[in-house]
Amino acid sequence: MIQRRGLITGFIALCIAGSFGTAKADETASAKKAIQAIYAKAATAAAKKDANGMTAHFAPDYESIALDGTITKGAAIKSNLERFLQGVKSITETTSITKLTLKGGTATVLYKGTANIIVVVPQTKKEGRLVIERTGETQWEKKGGAWLARRAKTLTNKQSLDGKELSAPVKQPKKG
């Protein structure tokens, strides 16, 4: 009888663990789908050259960490985007999640993204194709049922202008 109880208890524990694993997988898949939809929405905003839409998913304390360790706050990113978009003719952007790890209401996302941008090159005043290929890690937090990006870190960033690799980002003209 004691052996049978042990088997039943073990079976129940396995069932609970199995359902927990399934629930966790469902939560992870749901988070991945929701965050991927945010990336798609930001890409749509980029195509419209809408800085507000491109940054709508930023948490109030959002910050981005560049390859060199420079930290930029969300408000500054939005301001820089607005200035950059003045010299942009068109943008096509794609971002895909390569890995997502979920712990409670926090998701760590590894992503890969490409932006194809037709810009007016400040030095020549002619149009050029700027291609940015990047990978990064973003920390997301679920607040009030919505996912917000809190911190992004660039892991790789390759840029080319008309097929020629750039060593530094294209400088934008100053307002004036």
Image (cartoon, rainbow, N blue to C red):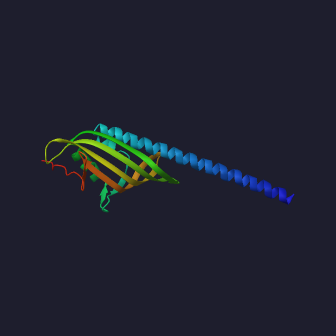
Report the label total: 0
Residue lying at the far right of the rendered structure: 1
Q: Is residue 136 left or right of residue 163?
A: right
Q: Is residue 103 left or right of residue 18?
A: left
Residue at the image point whose x is 44% and y is 43% from the top: 36
Q: Position of residue 163 (x, y in %)?
A: 25, 46
Q: Nearer the viewer, residue 91 or 26?
A: 91
Residue at the image point whose x is 26% and y is 49% from the top: 160
> Compared to 69, does 150 lie above or below?
above
Residue at the image point whose x is 38% and y is 56% from the top: 151
> Compared to 57, does 7 lie above or below?
below
Q: Nearer the viewer, residue 94 or 72?
A: 94
Q: Nearer the viewer, residue 14 or 147?
A: 14
Residue 5 visible, this orientation: yes
Quadrant where the N terminus lies? bottom right
Residue 142 visible, this orientation: no
Residue at the image point whose x is 27% and y is 53% from the top: 76
> Compared to 144, does 2 lie above or below?
below
Q: Position of residue 157 (x, y in %)?
A: 32, 54
Q: Position of residue 124 (x, y in %)?
A: 13, 45
Residue lying at the far front of the rendered structure: 163
Q: Nearer the viewer, residue 165 or 84?
A: 165
Q: Position of residue 82 (x, y in %)?
A: 24, 45
